[in-house]
Amino acid sequence: VSLLHKRLWDEARTLLRDQLLPVAKRSLGADHDLTLKLNQNLSAALQLSPEHTRDDLLEAQTIMQDVIQRRRRVFGPAHPNTLRAEAAEATLSRMRQVQRRRFT
């Protein structure tokens, strides 16, 4: 997360995608809270980068939809982390709408 706070988007994306997430999924499982948090961080790195593309936003939204589905199933719809993930996905959805309007 410190890479995200330092706004090192590419480094965070690479570390999460290539190293942390594969190990977390293999050792903890896809539904573990830490694995879900790492996925959310990857989504954030994709969407917050000033150089993000439409594909980055689409990937970030796909990741968040998967995280929300898993959080609802594992932790329930009223769990604080589920609610935070839903709020993050709503923000991402608005970002995609704004970007779509710019390109149409």
Image: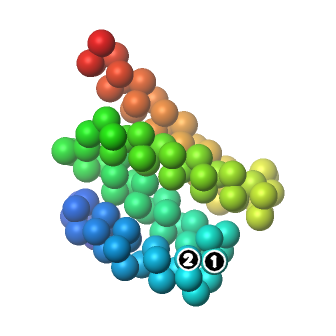
Q: Which mark is residue 25?
A: 2
Residue ID at (26%, 18%):
103
Image side of residue 37 versus residue 95, left or right: right
Please tell me which residue is depicted at 41% across the width and 40% down the height of the picture: 58
Residue at the disc numbered 1? 29
83 with respect to 62 (left or right): right
Q: Amino acid at mark 1?
A: Gly
Residue occupying the far bottom of the picture: 27
The image shows residue 27, relative to residue 94, as above or below, that is: below
Seen in the image, is 63 located left or right of residue 18?
A: right
- Around disc 1, counting alpha carbons within 10 Å, would you say few (fewer than 14), some (14 to 19), or many (20 or more)? some
Q: Position of residue 79 (x, y in %)?
A: 75, 58
Residue 12's disc is: none
Question: Hey, what amino acid is under mark 2?
Answer: Lys
The CA span between labels 1 and 2 is: 4 Å
Q: Are marks 1 and 2 in contact (CB under 8 Å)?
A: yes
